[in-house]
Amino acid sequence: FTPEQPHTAALAVGSFDDSFVERASPVGQAQVVAHLHTQHAQDVSGLIVGQSVGQFYIGSIEQREGHNYTFLPFFCAKSSHSYEKWPINMAWQADPTNGFSSKFPTFAPTLIIGIVIMKKQILAGAAIILSAALTACNGNKAQTEETETQQTETVAADLFSADSAYAYVQRQVDFGPRIPGTDAHKACGDWLAATLRSYGATVLEQRAEVKAYTGEMLPMRNIIASYNPEASQRILLMAHWDTRPFSDEDPNSAMHTKTFDGADDGGSGVGVLLEIARTLGQRDSIGIGVDLVLFDTEDYGTSGNDDSWCLGSQYWSKNPLPAGYKATAGILLDMVGSKGATFYWEYFSKRYAPGILSEVWQLAAEMGYGSYYIQADGGALTDDHLPVIRNLGIPCINIVNYSPKNKHGFGDYWHTQNDNMDNIDKATLDAVGETLLRYLDMRATASVQ
């Protein structure tokens, strides 16, 4: 924890009596828990404590305006032990290795989740809080510091919501298989573009006809959503939104010509990016440019013909929209929603963007998502990131559920009737979405230093 860098904290608000709420959330530079001891949701005065790299801090939550909050940190001190009990009668335990425990007492109102960004450490009132906290922290001593001018910045609630991402996946599935040329494909595309616009993005659509390996001409519709379009430093986030027209990997050969839901293969990556778009749309400032590209006609290929796949990204990378498009880094999401997903180092990602790959996987490990992001080599995959690398020269990585231990690398549901909502896990969506937001914040911070 350093006062020179922006940090974020999760905030939980509820109405309850003799207990409290805490929400573990590895956001920004710290795992944070918010404690409120109020009788009414309208009164959000309380304490918030957190831990980062062997340190802890404490402060108050004040100045509620809608869903905006101000966090006033009082001090930061060294600590490597579990906390025991604060003198305001709120007992809780925190394990520095496994993160904070979670206690959710029964109460009616829905939790309201908020984000607070701290630009400066504030020490006003430290003397009052410091003596109590030193006793509670197993005798650890904090050094006094001179009081600094109080300066905080608040933003609208923008914590990544796995529930919301899950709902976006469900909404896509509800349209039916998003096969190019079908009514479901058109309706879903209309909804995607409208949803992105509603979240404040500048949306462009790229339409063309592309030739499938069968000789059939497919109507292609790439959807590009931009935030802070004037910024020169840009991060590209990608996923495909179409569905394969047949489940040719199904164990039942009678199903090989049947369509399937495409909940994970297509739906999950888009669901995460829509939730990213929602959070970006709530921020007053992003600091960098962020572009979300939803590629069409990715999944219409055939084995043994690499060029038959990724038709939408091939077209866009040769005819970029906006014209002359450039980005510092690109991240592709493909099949990022299933239970027990594992994301190995994809070969082309490691070859062309080793620095980005290392940064993202290290961030994920620091945030407690190491069981998803496996720091070992995976496969060499023909996917939407590859045309972008080759045709635009943008270093890109692929976060994809692929394990060299599996029969064909992908999950058993891949291109089968079983790629449905039963496979989608909110914890996996959260591991991907939280990591992406953390990465964007890190790049934004680096851009102003």
Image (cartoon, rainbow, N blue to C red):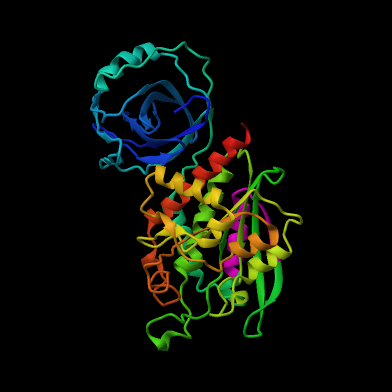
Residue farthest to the bottom, as pictured:
254
- Locate residue 152, reporting x and y percent: 52, 24
Q: Pick whichever, 300 or 385, lies toward us.
A: 385
Specify whether residue 28 is painted magenta. no
The mark tally for this picture is 0
The part of the image, by quadrant, that contains residue 25 is top left
Reply above or below: 78 against 301. above
Reply above or below: 318 against 442. below
Reply above or below: 446 against 390. above
Q: Quadrant of the N terminus?
A: top left
Q: Pick whichever, 280 or 265, lies toward us.
A: 265
The part of the image, by quadrant, that contains residue 59 is top left
The magenta segment: 187-206
Q: Quadrant of the C terminus?
A: top right
Which residue shows up at 63% across the image and 33% down it?
Answer: 448
Please say whether residue 93 is visible from this viewpoint: yes
406 relative position to 356: left or right: left
Residue farthest to the right, as pictured:
323
- Locate residue 431, reporting x and y percent: 42, 51
> Majority secondary structure of the magenta segment?
helix
Please say whether residue 434 is visible from this viewpoint: no
- Locate residue 181, reporting x and y percent: 62, 77
- Locate residue 36, reporting x and y percent: 33, 30
37 relative position to 4: left or right: left
400 relative position to 293: left or right: left
Which residue shows up at 49% across the image and 39% down it?
Answer: 157
